[in-house]
Every structure is written in structure tokens, then in C-alpha cells.
Image: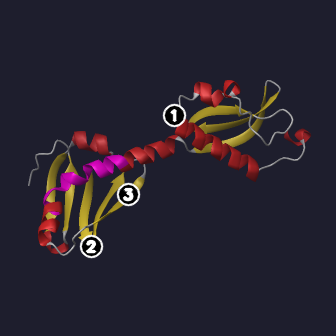
Amino acid sequence: MNNTHKYIDDVAHFPESYSVIVWLNKAGQQVLNTSSYEISISRGSVDVEWTDKSFGHQYIGIALENSEDESSIEYILGNPENVIEDIESRLESLREKAASEVTDIKREFIEGSAALTFKVAGEDHLEWLDDEDHNFLINNLGDSHLSINGNFSDEIYDAIVKQLKEWLAENPIDDIEEAA
């Protein structure tokens, strides 16, 4: 059965198991980062599952207001495009989280100054450490490479700084000479 939604290519209905499988067209695959998704209804919940090309298996559980009402169940399964917005929202959230995930953190001396080097979303960044105590970041916005060069929203910048501070707390050094 073909669907008229701009992202849906085909839908297979399985009434006996209260589920549908939705196959996406090329535009839908590009926007939603998957080729298909499944909607099933069980125990008072609408379950949406798919495999994201970047983030793997995904699941959204949506409370079903009246799980005994057959017409509600038929409406949900008959209109699988209604969960596309939920999938888009999840994908946006996953991308934001990935954009603020810090990896490969290490202490280094750059041009004689202590710094943390690290990656955010695969890109190299650095933040200067306090000259007197290499367990603390310099928090002056004017001195922050991340705030100047990162083009991050305030929320993502705050999440990155939080991760760096946590790393410093978990990996302290007692002596500046130790870092050199």
C-alpha cells in the first residue's frame, strides 16, 4: 500500500500483531537517517523502533491514552506518518548530544602554556589550563579557544566545559613538574 506522505514509500500492516512496518523513500531516508521504522502497540504503549545509520537501534515509547479503544489503535496504525516528527526530534537530540561529546582528552604544553587538547564531534580543540594549577581551566571567555573557535551554542559549550572539568577532577596532577 503506497502512502501519500512525502517520506513514505510503502507500509506493511500486520493487524494480528498490532504493528506496521514503514519503508521510506530516498528523501525520507536522508532526513530520518534510516530506511524503515516499525510501529507496534503493546501494553498501553505505542512503540516506535528503527535502526539509525549513525546511532544504531532506537526506540521511542509513547503512552497510549486509551489502549482499549480499537478505533485509537486503528488510527495510529493507519497513520504511521504521525510518528515522523518524534523520530526527527530523537535524531536532533542524538546529533546535539554527539556534537557535545568530548573524546581524546589529554594534557599538553603548547607554546610553553598548559592546555587540554581534545576532540568534539571528531574535530580538534584546546582549552588553556591555569598556569598555577593545571587542574583548572582558564574561565575567561576571551582566553577560551573553544568559545572563540568552536561555534557552539551556549548549551553545548556548557556541556563541553562540564565534561572537561569532570575529566580534570578525575585525573588530577599534584605537581606542575609532573605535567611537564
Task: Of the two numbered discs 1 and 3 on the same chain, state the one appearing first in sequence.
Answer: 3
Q: Nearer the viewer, residue 25 or 79?
A: 79
- Most extreme residue toward the front is 65
Q: Are marks 1 and 3 in contact (CB under 8 Å)?
A: no
| Rendering quarter of residue 105 | top right
Residue 104 image position (x, y, % from top left)? 65, 43
Q: Which mark is residue 153?
A: 1
Q: Which mark is residue 58?
A: 3
Is residue 21 covered in magenta? Answer: no
Q: Secondary structure at mark 2?
A: strand
| Residue pointed to by mark 2 | 42
Q: Nearer the viewer, residue 155 or 113?
A: 155
Q: Secondary structure at mark 1?
A: loop
User: Depth-wise, is mark 1 or mark 3 nearer the camera?
Assistant: 1
Q: Amino acid at mark 2?
A: Ser
Q: Amino acid at mark 1?
A: Ser
Name the residue: 69% across, 49% down: 166
| Rendering quarter of residue 20 | bottom left
Residue 39 image position (x, y, % from top left)? 24, 62
Left or right, 41 with reference to 71:
right
* Chain part drawn in magenta: 77-89
Left or right, 168 with reference to 162:
right
Q: Quadrant of the C terminus?
A: top right
| Rendering quarter of residue 58 | bottom left
Disc 3 versus disc 2: distance between alpha carbons? Answer: 17 Å
- How crowded pointer 1 is (Cα within 10 Å; few <14, some 14-19, many 20+) is rated as few
Q: Secondary structure at mark 3?
A: strand
Name the residue: 18% across, 75% down: 68
Q: Are marks 2 and 1 in contact (CB under 8 Å)?
A: no
Left or right, 173 with reference to 38:
right
